[in-house]
Image (cartoon, helix red, strand yellow):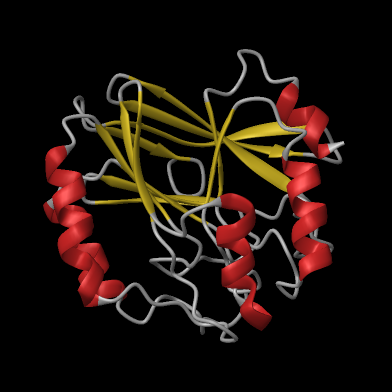
Amino acid sequence: MGKNAVNSLDPKADLIFISGDITLEGILPEYELAKERIQGFEGLMMLVPGNHDARHLGFQLFREFFGRLEFYKEVEDIGIVGLDSSEPDRDEGHIGRDKYKWIEESLKNSKKFKIIGLHHHLVPVPNSGREQNIINDAGGVLDLVLRNDVALILMGHRHVPYAVRVHNTLIVNAGTFSSTRTRAHLGNSFNVIDIQDKSITVTAHDIEKGKEKVMVEFDKDKNIYINRYYSK
């Protein structure tokens, strides 16, 4: 049902970004199933590993099935840095200062609309329970993001769709696409992010109910920011 909802989008998605946790325990049968299911999506696919994917040497299987754990790629007017925030057999996330130079060089070389995608969240996410897994070098990463004019951060991990602006960067968290570990009445969902020049609209799609709701509208050039959680 979820796959059909994504494939039936009009217009079709130019890019599908998966922010990790495509497995539960990072074991071979789960990776085989994930590969099979992911191949059913229509469109260019990019993904990074989550904390569950790195369990039981799962990070090795991720490379085998999906390629590099981290990357910089350009798609039309978008430059995207994919980061591995997972730690083998641990729930908490980490980027590491040894990666900062590569991240910054990738961003500075990009004249395009800049995006960073990772699994663990960079800022706390409301309605997601007790805070304990924000990346442990979040301050350094956030400073790097803001200094390099990153337009959009894509995150996962907390199973709650959410978006908030920090300075000139929009930080967007995905809900859970297929896990049974949903929260209250949130259910399974995915985000659709529409980028037009310097404007960004984020819409959460509820898979079971077949409904959609705009979360955030943000225009960087006009400095217009409307957030359905807080705007009146």
Find the residue positioned furthest to the front: 64
Residue 100 lies in quadrant: bottom left
Residue 181 showing in the rendered view: no
Instruction: Locate residue 96, reporting x and y percent.
Output: 29, 76
Residue 13 showing in the rendered view: yes
Vertical arrangement, residue 137 with respect to residue 210, above or below: below
Task: Give me the residue at 59% from left, 74% from top.
Answer: 54
- Quarter of the image with the C terminus in it: top left
Vertical arrangement, residue 91 with respect to residue 171, above or below: below
Q: Looking at this view, is 191 or 33 the one in front?
A: 33
Instruction: Locate residue 36, reporting x and y percent.
Output: 80, 45
- Quarter of the image with the N terminus in it: top right
Vertical arrangement, residue 47 with respect to residue 92, above or below: above
Q: Looking at this view, is 137 or 221 the one in front?
A: 137
Residue 207 lies in quadrant: top right
Vertical arrangement, residue 187 with respect to residue 86, above or below: above
Q: Looking at this view, is 155 or 227 the one in front?
A: 155
Total count of labels: 0
Left or right of 191? Residue 138 is left
Task: Give me the residue at 80% from left, 63% from top.
Answer: 30
Left or right of 212? Residue 181 is right
Find the residue positioned furthest to the top: 11
Instruction: Locate residue 125, reporting x and y percent.
Output: 50, 65
Left or right of 13? Residue 136 is left
Instruction: Locate residue 162, reporting x and y percent.
Output: 53, 52
Task: Give me the residue at 52% from left, 52% from top.
Answer: 67
